[in-house]
Amino acid sequence: MKKLLLVSLCFLMLCITQVYAQNRTVSGTVTASDDGLPIPGATVRVKGTATGTQTSTSGKYSLSVPANGTIIVSFLGYSTQEVAVGGNSVLNVTLKTSSRELGEVVVTGALGVKRQSKELGYAATNITAKQLTEAHPTNFTTGLSGKAPGLLVSTVNNGINPDTRFTLRGNRHINGNNFALVVLNGTPISPNEVSSINSDDIESVNILNGAGAAALYGSEASNGALVITTKRGSVGGTPQITYSNTYQLEQISYMPALQNKFGGYGGEGAPYQDPVTGFITTTTPYENQSYGPAYDGHLQALGIPLEDGTIQSYPYAAPSGKSYARRFFETGHSDQHSVSYAAGDANNAFNLTAYRLDQKGIVPLDKFNKTQLRITGVKTVGMFRADATGSFSQSNSDVYGDYGGILSTIYNTPSWVPLQNFKDPTKPFADPSTYFNSYGINPYWSINNSRIKKRQDVFNGSFSGTLTPTKWFDATYRLSYNGGLYQEQSRRAQINYTPYALSDPTNGGGTVASSYKAAVNPGTVSNYKQFGDGGSTIGRGGPQGYSRIQQDVLTNFHYNFFNDQLKANLLVGNSIWQEYVDVVSNGSNNLAIQDYYNVNAILGVPNAGQDTRKIRQIAYFGDLSLGWKDWAFVEGTLRNDHDSRLTAANRSIWYPSVKGSLVLTSAIDALKGSKILSFAKIRGGYSQVGDVNVDPYSSLNTFNTTNGFPYGNVGGLTQSSTLNNPNLKPEITKEVEVGADLGFFDSRVNLNATYYNTHTTNQTLNVSTSPTTGYTGSVLNIGETQNTGAEFMLNLDVLRKSANGVGLNLSGNFTIQNSKVVSLFGDLKRLSLGGYTIANTFAAIGLPYTVIYVTDVNRDDKGRVIVNPTTGMPSANPTLVNAGQTTPKYLLGLTQQVSYKFITLSVTEEYRAGNVIFSQSLQSATAAGVSQFSTSSDRQRFIFPNSVINTGTAAAPVYTPNTTVSVSDGALGFWDAGAFYSSGAAYVSSGAFWKVREASLTFDLTRWAKKTNFIKRASFALNGRNLFMFRPKTNNWVDPEFANSPNNGDIGVNSTNQMPPSRFFGGTISVTF
């Protein structure tokens, strides 16, 4: 038996040797027919095999081909050509500009399957590396803004490494995750890891808008997907080294509208005696509220004298030019360096990239850095191809904490106070005991003494092997890992006030004594800590470990029938992944040594905790696609998931989908060769995808440790207050999608249009229960949402650029998104999601998801404000009113690109509308008297606009327009008290905006650089991001894009922690050797 096996193996090796002996190396150059220039990056492959290569920067290729073989040459925008090798060893190929460009775009879909766009029965958008890095953002998701229909990318706040939120076709899960799935080289990754990806590493991003497009990813793909493919090296190309450097400055672009007319006064009970002049004045120099006299330029004391009698005084006037608040923010900068080495031959490819980012923030002392290394290799040996990639990224940030709320302190500082004079917190009048403001801490002291430091280490890696023993079958095994280690430390310094600071030396009539500075009696100051926090504080969030390991087995059968008229492809596979999260935290506000931030210095029991979670999923799936005569295509998928978060009875979940497309210009003879309609395709599909929107262990009741235990040697546990549900099932998203792709005039005009209708049922929601049950809440499958919309994308190739001529391309996308909450639970009409007392976001039946309900003043049936006939003041309405939806209904993105010879100008704009925002920070600033809003009446009494007076009776009211009764107080009594102050409706404005997202002016210096004989390509670009923003007049306070957090209930609501927006501008130099 052993001899027989040995003889068989020898015979097999002999056959393989003979096969390879018949191969020959074919080389040549691929050029374009219109200008004769070489085409770098064109794909050259052997027909019927997986063997292939790409042309080098000079358009050259080299490939091992069987003697009677055929090569297929393709490149985006050009017609694919098949050329028989025959006896040739040199084959030069000329590609013609394609009139079927819309159908030949290659799209990477679910599980990394590549298809031509004409085969797709769903909407998908391909974003190239060039489009993505036009303005070189530090987070690649911001480079997608305005470039794809249905995609909403929002930066939640400004500052160092801010969070981003990216959704496709709106929000459909009430309490669940609405983020699009992010897939990196075939493997899903956590949204937290997106910022670790180097934009220069990305080859393309394919946006799969709907659930049907990403159905093969199962329960993770109900929100669509962003499929990222990184650069793999230069197969068949000569070795090359590319270096790029982008340096950009960051400056505040828009500040909240602050008033510059009035100084400090907050309704103190007694006049203040100015220590400089001795005069009694209503200006209160230690106030944060600005309801004092109008500025007149006189020399005014600020704050209280030092204990030795030293006084600080400044002109009682706002500065000319930039406000002192704006001057607090510095000019930030970012410095990106990227260097890559790519090489390869006919069967191998290698790519190594190193990346470094150093960033200084607009808030003093804030900084961030990121270092990344990525290595990729491809090896083809006969019928076997191996593909491996790995990356490691480390980022470090050091940002201010929120000691007393520095942004609120900055905004609420009277505009005549020169904040920059307190930049050195060690100088007189700058520390907490001597700072002028009795209601806040010097923001410069805060940023020095309250810091949050984070470190994030992320590793992503994958290996895949593909075996292609025959032309009709191939099998792939892929093993991937992605994980991260997150560490965070927050520090807050202890505040020790002096006895003098606590003795109320201001003669303020007890006002200061009511502030936190006098929260303890003089003489006990040495152990007093702000807010009673117990002193220096340390909090450690970490280490927090996250890991995901996944294996995929893909078997692919592809065969042609009826003389190649019917093309069939069957994919059958298995996927197993496991996710593990381990979060450890500890901290205390009671340290043995003041300002010594070490957990070993904690006195007493630390605030410690640990959360460990593990999820495992096993899936089986299949995908059958059929193509008839290259004009009719149909695809059906079926996936079965088994998820550990659900009980055994509900663990098996089936997800089917079917979609198809029909290329009319190929199917109908009358349309073939049309000079007007160059491409026409209709498509449609149906899909059902689930989402397991439950935390691990939510199907069983759990126990937690309780206060007071352990008591001696006795431990204590208490049952969770939430009654968990063993019958929980996945949320189910069913989607119907139809669309059309049209090309006109030799594909100079291309239009894509899509309509979708999505229903999501079995929503997983927390509901309240009677405490008599022993629980305060339970988790149930209830509720339904519906999302409908239309997506359009138009590309106008007005002037196709020749070698040295002019090129003009215009593209735009427009989206209409509608959503509705269909049902909740029982008689429940609306479910609170987040916000504030005066403005709360809800999921409400029959209304868009989400809407914001606010408090308001009383109005008549015509919407006019009812005021008191004596005081002229409005009264509060106890019922919350719907102020509008918080997510944009309309999205518009426009890109213009014009080229002349070696110069290219590209600009991208984005418009959003159809939503409202609530500004809690505006309410705070108005109460403090620092907003322009609070000076709209110049602090004089006024008649409330559009107000009426009841001239009838309470039972039979008659509302008469108010033309005579003014409000009793046009200053503090109106803006900081009463019904209008507590009316959330007063701080709601349109969320619409128009932004110039990106602009770049690129100079291609290649023709001159090549003269050096060692530089292959070179370019220089001037670029900028978020250069301009235009908002309705009703919103002069906040960037509508910002929100409290990326969570569903915080969208459309901002807080006093919202930073002002920035613009970025700088340049990029890129050289390839």
Image (cartoon, rainbow, N blue to C red):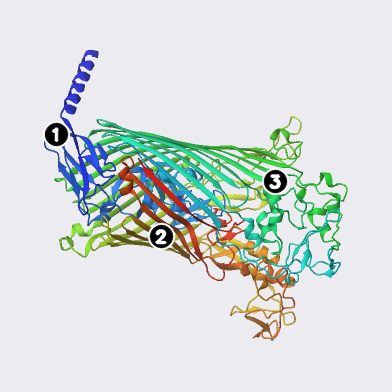
Indicate left or right for 146 with 285 as reference: left
Crowding around mark 2 (Cα neighbors within 10 Å: few <14, some 14 to 19, many 20+) is many
From this viewpoint, is residue 828 visible?
Answer: no
Q: Earlier in the sequence, mark 1 or mark 2?
A: 1
Give the Cα distance between marks 1 and 2. Answer: 50 Å
Give 426 or 491, whichever is nearer the viewer. Answer: 426
Choose between 157 and 884: the one closer to the eye.
157
**123 left or right of 968?**
left
- Could you tell me the amino acid type at mark 1? Ala
Q: Which residue is mark 2?
A: 907
Q: Foreground residue, 313 or 923? A: 313
129 shown above or below 11: below
**Which callout, 3 or 2, points at the residue further toward the start of the chain?**
3
Query: Who is closer to the viewer here, 102 or 1070?
Result: 1070
The residue located at (24%, 36%) in the rendering is: 51
Q: Quadrant of the C terminus?
A: top left
Residue designated by label 3: 449
Residue depicted at 56% across the width and 49% down the height: 160
